[in-house]
Image (tube, grey):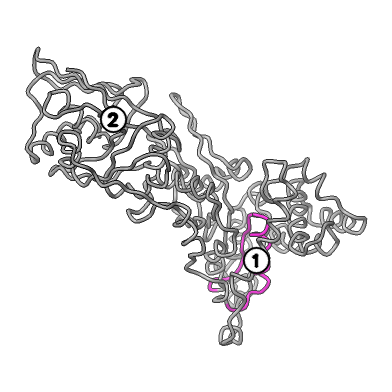
């Protein structure tokens, strides 16, 4: 008997429905699995055999042929265990299968028949709804994530016995429903850190506010213990809240990467990713034999923090150049091409020298050669793509001992939101949301300068020997500073402040 059952495969951050054809034939004995399965799927026969035996069923001693169509698309992972097992039972007449084709069935089996969670549930649920399936049957741990997709029934199962009884005896499965908008609104301002906890560093806080208002990349340069990491961790608390569309985009990426918790249904705050400096190229940008999104995609719509940036391998940093410009990553292989979104705000930090204390190093432990080698770990083209360079000074004892709290993130966020609203209105007819995204055409139109501002930036270009890209960055940051002040035109004080945010271009660092 031939039975068709439906599963789903992840490709990039979207899903494709897989038809699993199970044919049980009396003419011989054997188990044949075809359709480009990986090793995890090939090993499923052992898991399925033990799981069925432990719930009172068995794999029949006949010729079983299983085809996973389309046959030229590689399938991977243990998520097909449940669908293959139910298909075998239905094809061998051990259970009824009248409406089995109405459901997407996915789940990994333990040997005792319990279901283990799988990756990529959100895109699977979205695709199932688009193709008109009646429902989707998943491990209980995944159902909150799938239930944020409306107009499709999501059923939770803890073990294969519950799924068998659902089809065979009509016993209902637990139906999971979530009020997506309510859950989204409840947790939208749930931040673990606040800028009021930062002592001193008013200049750095101002630079962070400008960066958040325009979506600009920023690097913090300062000695150990000056608060660089502390400042970076608080950036999400002053960024505009995620829209529901952005939340779904972000959740989809984390779902594919298997980073969603059992109690999490929707990402409600912007992600903050801080990879260690030993990270590999592939782990940062994504890819691999079985492509997975990297850290820059997991930071989509949020913040990517690179602590001690010169300690990262140069090759790792250089692969970020294209994503910083294009805001997406394209992984190309001989058989396929995958696109991952990567629109993130880069926040980086570094010490001014290998010892960490230049130019205030009391022991002068860093030679000129060592300092030059340390600074050369960051290439000019990469630094050009970072809009704001800010020096973070050592915090004095008086500031540390002061009991008065600093300005709260909530207050800074209000100013950032006003500036973002100005930008949203300005670019409403374009596919642009904030100043960091504008290109040469928009810079020419929206970043025009008066005579004094033009003279100021001309002098800076000549004295600092800035590149054309750095010139564009200064104009973009000037536009953001003007937006924060509610000014329609860019004035000389806006340009002057933006030039001050190019520390690494100045002679002090390049000498």
Q: Residues within 10 Å of mark 1 (few under 14, many from 20)?
A: some
Residue found at the far top of this picture: 27
In depth, the one of 104 and 314 nearer the eye is: 104
**Left or right relative to 107: residue 8:** right
- Count of number-bearing discs: 2
**Left or right relative to 488: residue 396:** left
Position of residue 382 measured from the top left corner of the image (x, y, whole percent): 63, 48
**The C terminus, quarter of image:** bottom right
Q: Nearer the viewer, mark 1 or mark 2?
A: 1
Per the image, label 2 sits on a secondary structure element best described as: loop
Point 26% across, 39% down: residue: 107
Occupied quadrant, residue 310: bottom right
The residue pinned by badge 1 equals 414
**Left or right relative to 299: residue 324:** right
In depth, the one of 474 and 361 nearer the eye is: 474
Point 22% across, 23% down: residue: 33
Per the image, label 1 sits on a secondary structure element best described as: helix
In depth, the one of 268 and 446 nearer the eye is: 268
The residue pinned by badge 2 equals 38
> Where does the magenta region start and end?
199-225
Position of residue 44 measured from the top left corner of the image (x, y, whole percent): 20, 33
């Amino acid at each position: 008997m031939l039975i068709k059952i439906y599963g789903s495969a992840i490709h990039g951050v979207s899903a494709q429905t897989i038809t699993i054809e199970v044919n049980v034939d009396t003419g011989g004995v054997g188990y044949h699995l075809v359709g480009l399965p990986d090793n995890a799927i090939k090993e499923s026969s052992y898991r399925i055999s033990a799981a069925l035996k432990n719930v009172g069923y068995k794999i029949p001693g006949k010729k079983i042929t299983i085809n996973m169509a389309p046959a030229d698309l590689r399938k991977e992972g243990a998520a097909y265990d449940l669908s293959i097992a139910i298909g075998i039972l239905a094809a061998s007449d051990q259970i009824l299968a009248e409406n089995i084709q109405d459901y997407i069935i996915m789940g990994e089996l333990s040997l005792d028949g319990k279901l283990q969670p799988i990756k990529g549930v959100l895109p699977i649920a979205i695709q199932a709804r688009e193709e008109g399936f009646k429902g989707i049957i998943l491990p209980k741990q995944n159902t909150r994530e799938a239930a944020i997709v409306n107009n499709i029934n999501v059923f939770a199962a803890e073990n294969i016995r519950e799924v068998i009884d659902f089809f065979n005896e009509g016993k209902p499965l637990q139906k999971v429903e979530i009020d997506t908008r309510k859950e989204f609104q409840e947790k939208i301002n749930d931040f673990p850190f606040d800028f009021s906890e930062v002592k001193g560093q008013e200049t750095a806080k101002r630079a962070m506010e400008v960066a958040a208002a325009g979506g600009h990349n920023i690097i913090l340069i300062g000695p150990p213990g000056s608060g660089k990491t502390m400042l970076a961790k608080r950036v999400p608390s002053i960024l505009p809240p995620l829209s529901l569309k952005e939340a779904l985009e972000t959740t989809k990426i984390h779902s594919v990467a298997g980073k969603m918790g059992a109690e999490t249904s929707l990402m409600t705050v912007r992600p903050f990713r801080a990879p260690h400096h030993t990270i590999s190229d592939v782990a940062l940008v994504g890819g691999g034999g079985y492509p997975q999104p990297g850290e820059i995609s997991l930071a989509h719509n949020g913040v990517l923090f690179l602590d001690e940036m010169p300690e990262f391998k140069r090759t790792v940093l250089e692969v970020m150049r294209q994503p910083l410009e294009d805001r997406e990553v394209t992984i190309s292989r001989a058989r396929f091409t995958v696109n991952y979104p990567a629109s993130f705000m880069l926040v980086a930090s570094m010490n001014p020298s290998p010892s960490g204390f230049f130019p205030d190093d009391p022991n002068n432990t860093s030679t000129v050669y060592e300092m030059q080698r340390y600074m050369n770990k960051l290439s000019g083209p990469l630094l050009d793509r970072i809009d704001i360079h800010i020096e973070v000074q050592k915090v004095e004892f008086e500031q540390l001992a002061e009991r008065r709290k600093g300005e709260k993130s909530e207050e800074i966020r209000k100013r950032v939101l006003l500036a973002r609203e100005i930008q949203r209105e300005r670019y409403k007819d374009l596919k642009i949301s904030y100043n960091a995204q504008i290109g040469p055409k928009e810079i020419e139109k929206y970043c025009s300068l008066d005579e004094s501002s033009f003279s100021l930036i001309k002098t800076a270009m000549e004295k600092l020997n800035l590149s054309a890209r750095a010139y564009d960055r200064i104009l973009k940051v000037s536009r953001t500073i003007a937006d924060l002040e509610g000014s329609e035109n860019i004035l000389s004080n806006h340009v002057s402040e933006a030039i001050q945010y190019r520390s690494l271009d100045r002679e002090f660092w390049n000498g």
